[in-house]
Image (cartoon, helix red, strand yellow):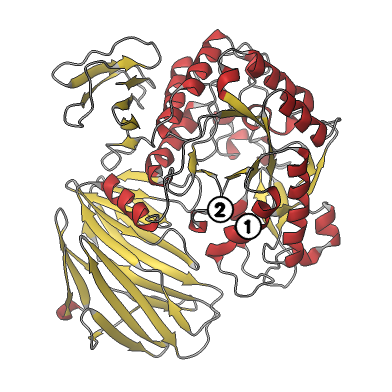
């Protein structure tokens, strides 16, 4: 990749394969004003440039690192401001074929094929990838950040418009500002680029061991209806099953056990109390786990009523309702307040003392909505550390922590596992929604944490015998007294049931869980599964773990259909998925991928897979898949 400063257009020029010539211009925006293009003059050192505006003096540094270009923008303001946005890289418009964006936390990944008439606004967090003629242009920030950095662009027909990488300082407390460095690279291997980006940031970390034990979680089937009795019914089935008992060793009670968010005491549905339940599960051979939303306090909780100093204030100087989900609302606890840290330590030390060794911490990203903290110098990117560090101290190194809605800029070393996909439900539309996050987050698995793709669910009419299968209606809380038509609540009719997976679709979703290489947590009403459902989950939990699977068509499709997973040095899994509503023929060249294929077996049927000339050619039914192991 070649770069230079083009004086004639006051822009920096990049020459890269697939894209030919690209130009970018740095910019600065102050107090919400329009972005100012900066007029650069070469500095005394090579690839250092300087600019001056009425609001500040700015310096741009470009450094070549092999096939990568690092761009750094910093400056000194002439006076204090409330908000500043530094944009080291803002590309001029260019043609492209595909775009991939990342969210800041679980889910949030989008994939676009650029077509005539396509119009989209793209928002990404730490990385964005644009592909043209088989080459991928990747813009990235460091994963671990202090200020809020992001990337944005637009799609207009077959062009990318306004592709920018920026850092936001709000509130802006300093005169000297330094944006997160932006790395630019172009490669024919988009997955390899993401992997290299992750490896550069985890160079001193050993790969984490992949846990071989699975778990069961109460949420996806029971939600807020979970009871002590139902937890034990599921645990008893697992303990009595010859396969599940060997592989499912963790029982997690999710949301619904507590009095309310912010008041972490057992409610009437758990009459024996949480300590007694932990003892029972431990005697049965399980690791007990418990769900918390540690940063949320509902208005009627004692902590919200008696200790408002622990709540983050809004612009008016008083606590504000920053959390809202399913019409349940709450204040945000200030993770930098010393009383909050002491309160967390007390709660989690107590539950660790009860015997809980697995803690699911949810809604962590809500804290980012706050802008004022007891510790004025608190950076948005460091909030996860402020939350998890005191909890980790309380539960000790022997306990495992799952970060849910964890903002990835918190970085490694905080949570043992992190949710990477959005909430799954036993419905095909959610399977399709989650595939991109699993495909796009492979680089985090074992480097930063263990990826959690969300629950391994399979229930439906073909896999369970359950009279209450369609009872829960997730979107009903959004119906208001004045709502005259159910069509006024988007998606309500489509979500009358959260359990409409066919056995074939369940097989495809469980294949995605296996190919992710990450955590396996069941979340169905197990006693209600029939033999078809039990067969599916038995094979899922018993599947040998591997590295995170790689979607080899991630940068040329909107839903990747072809996957390869390294299980061991000489063993691979391949996955082919038909996302369409029609039967279709799929081909995969195993020789080109260096995958042994002399004995390829269908994982679900234990039947050999036909390979001719080193290639698989197979017709798959709608929503079906082939999961095979060499």
x, y (%) of residue 407? Answer: 53, 54
Name the residue beneath numbered marker 1: 389
Nearer-the-camera pick, 423 or 451: 451
Q: Badge 2: few (under 14), some or many (20 or more) residues near its Cα, within 10 Å?
A: some
- Residue 279, compared with residue 381, is above or below; it is above
- Residue 63, compared with residue 284, is above or below; it is below
The kind of secondary structure element at disc 1 is helix
- Residue 465, compared with residue 253, is above or below; it is above
| Quadrant housing the N terminus | bottom left
| Quadrant housing the C terminus | top left
**Residue visible at 14% across and 55% down?**
17
State the CA–CA distance, disc 2 to disc 1.
7 Å
Nearer-the-camera pick, 46 or 129: 46
Q: Relative to 72, is 462 on the left or the right?
A: right
Name the residue beneath numbered marker 2: 414
> Which mark, by number, is residue 553?
none
Residue 499, picture quadrant: top right
Q: Badge 1: few (under 14), some or many (20 or more) residues near its Cα, within 10 Å?
A: some
């Amino acid at each position: 990749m070649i770069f230079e400063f083009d004086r004639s257009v006051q822009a920096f020029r990049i020459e890269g394969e697939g894209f030919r010539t690209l130009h970018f211009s740095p910019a600065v925006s102050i107090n919400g004003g329009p972005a100012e293009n900066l007029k650069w003059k070469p500095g005394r050192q090579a690839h250092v440039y300087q600019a001056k505006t009425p609001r500040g003096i700015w310096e741009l540094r470009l450094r070549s690192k092999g096939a990568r270009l690092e761009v750094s923008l910093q400056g000194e303001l002439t006076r204090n401001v409330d908000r500043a946005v530094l944009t080291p890289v803002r590309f001029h418009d260019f043609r492209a074929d595909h775009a991939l964006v990342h969210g800041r936390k679980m889910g949030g990944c989008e994939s676009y094929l650029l077509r005539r008439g396509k119009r989209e606004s793209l928002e990404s967090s730490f990385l964005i990838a644009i592909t043209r003629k088989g080459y991928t242009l990747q813009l990235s920030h460091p994963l671990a950040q202090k200020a809020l950095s992001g990337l944005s662009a637009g799609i207009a027909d077959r062009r990318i418009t306004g592709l920018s990488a920026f850092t936001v300082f709000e509130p802006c407390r300093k005169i000297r500002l330094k944006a997160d460095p932006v790395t630019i690279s172009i490669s024919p291997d988009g997955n390899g680029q993401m992997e290299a980006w992750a490896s550069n940031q985890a160079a001193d970390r050993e790969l984490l061991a992949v846990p071989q034990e699975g778990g069961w979680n109460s949420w996806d089937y029971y939600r807020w209806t979970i009871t002590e009795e139902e937890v034990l019914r599921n645990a008893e089935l697992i303990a009595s099953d010859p396969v599940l008992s060997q592989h499912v060793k963790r029982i997690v009670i999710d949301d619904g056990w507590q009095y309310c968010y912010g008041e972490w005491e057992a409610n009437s549905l758990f009459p024996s109390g949480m300590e007694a339940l932990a003892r029972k599960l431990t005697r049965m051979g399980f690791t007990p786990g418990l769900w918390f939303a540690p940063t949320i306090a509902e208005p009627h909780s004692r902590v919200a009523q008696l200790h408002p100093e622990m709540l983050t204030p809004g612009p008016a100087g008083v606590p504000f309702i920053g959390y809202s989900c399913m019409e349940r609302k709450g204040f945000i606890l200030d993770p930098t307040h010393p009383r909050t840290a002491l309160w967390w330590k007390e709660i989690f030390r107590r539950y660790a003392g009860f015997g809980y060794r697995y803690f699911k911490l949810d809604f962590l990203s809500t804290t980012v909505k706050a802008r004022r903290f007891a510790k004025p110098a608190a950076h948005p990117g460091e909030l996860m550390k402020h939350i998890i560090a005191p909890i980790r101290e309380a539960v000790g190194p022997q306990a495992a922590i799952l970060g849910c809605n964890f903002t990835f800029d918190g970085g490694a070393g905080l949570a043992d596992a992190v949710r990477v996909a959005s909430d799954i439900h036993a419905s095909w539309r959610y399977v399709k929604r989650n595939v991109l996050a699993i495909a796009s987050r492979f680089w985090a698995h074992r480097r930063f944490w263990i990826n959690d793709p969300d629950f391994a669910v399979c229930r439906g009419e073909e896999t369970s015998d359950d009279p209450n299968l369609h009872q829960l209606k997730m979107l009903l809380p959004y119906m208001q007294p004045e709502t005259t038509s159910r069509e006024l609540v988007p998606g309500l009719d489509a979500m009358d049931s959260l359990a409409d997976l066919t056995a074939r679709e369940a097989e495809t979703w469980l294949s995605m869980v296996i190919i992710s290489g990450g955590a396996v947590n069941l979340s169905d009403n197990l006693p209600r599964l029939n033999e078809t459902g039990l067969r599916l989950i038995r094979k899922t939990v018993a599947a040998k773990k591997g590295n995170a699977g790689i979607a080899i068509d991630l940068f040329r499709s909107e839903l990747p259909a072809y996957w390869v997973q390294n299980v061991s040095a000489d063993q691979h899994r391949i996955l082919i998925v038909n996302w369409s509503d029609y039967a279709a023929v799929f081909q995969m060249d195993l020789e080109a991928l260096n995958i042994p294929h002399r004995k390829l077996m269908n994982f679900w049927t234990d039947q050999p897979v036909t390979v001719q000339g080193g290639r698989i050619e197979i017709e798959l039914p709608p929503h079906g898949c082939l999961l095979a192991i060499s």
